[in-house]
Amino acid sequence: MHAKKSLGQNFLVGTHYPERILASVAPQSSETIIEIGPGHGALTELLIATQANIIAVELDRDLIPELQARFGSAPNFRLIEGDALAVNFGELLQPATAARVVANLPYYISTAILQRLIEQRAHIREMTLMLQREVVERIVARPGGKEYGYLAALVQFFCETKKLFDVPPGAFRPIPKVTSSIVQLRVREQTVAAVADEPFFLALLSSIFAQRRKTLWNNLRAAKGKFNLDDLQLRAALTAANIDAQRRAETLTLEETAQLSNQLWELT
Ligand code: SAM
């Protein structure tokens, strides 16, 4: 199989893992499923057979003719040539309003695609994603632990997370160097805590985790220009949120981070 490294192509071979992924998703015939990066269609074929409406988004135009030839005549299949980082899921889904997403993602876009899917979460109920095992461990980590950081905070604020199972390198061609894992993210009806301004909260999240070795105080000070806040205001917000400035961001619960965000937002 010809594979493009630049597009992170490692294709599932055999039926065992595609079938396990399908069983984890268990599509209903009335729902819409978006598959990102169908590749040569290992999972697509199984998805189509469930009778659910399948919309596949593939960036590599060289794969389009093969996918179209194999599945184009299925009435419940639609193929979009495009970049999953750029598509508008709301428009894509019409006439449905929400869907579940399945993807075996190229590793180099994992963070970007997670950010994008979370941004578009009004149209997404659940995501079943194959990612590098280390990335999945970072997504499901709990505050205080070594793995906990920006990715966990971001994803867990908006989704319930569950690691399902590992997929060994031998399940793919070409064989990757790393083990993969499947993680399921269920979009919460409400975020873990209420935030006054979501873009501000997201910007704060990335700032407080900018330098892992630094204290919360030092990360906040490094970002104060971005937020147009001075030291006094930072101190006031930390005190009001009852958070010790010498802590590290990875020890903060999401509720505490939301509190801090709301206090800072009031001062901007
Ligand atoms: N799902 C197939 C499988 O499991 O065998 C292929 C998985 S392969 C790791 C990733 C797929 O995503 C490739 O087909 C690649 O061309 C596609 N891809 C890469 N970047 C993409 C993007 N930004 N938007 C949509 N598809 C993308």
Image (tube, rainbow, N blue to C red):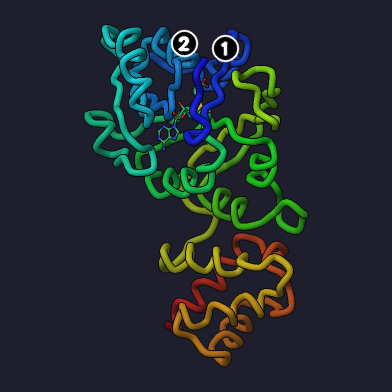
State whether residue 240 is above or below residue 75.
below
Type of the residue with mark 1: Glu
**Can residue 177 be seen here?**
yes
Q: Position of residue 63 (x, y in %)?
A: 38, 20
Q: Which mark is residue 19?
A: 1
User: Disc 1 vs disc 2: Cβ atoms closer than 8 Å?
Assistant: yes
The local crowd at label 2, few if under 14, some if 14 to 19, many if 20 or more residues have their Cα within 10 Å, is some
Residue 96 pos. (x, y %): 27, 29
Classify 182 as above or below 268: above
Quick check: is the Cβ at mark 2 less than 8 Å away from ligand 1? no
The residue positioned 57% from the left and 85% from the top of the image is 234
- Compared with residue 137, is residue 209 higher up or lower down, i.e. above or below? below
Kind of residue at badge 2: Leu
Separation (CA) of disc 1 from disc 2 = 7 Å
Q: Which residue is mark 2?
A: 46
* Residue at 39% across, 24% down: 33
> What SS does tag 1 mark?
helix
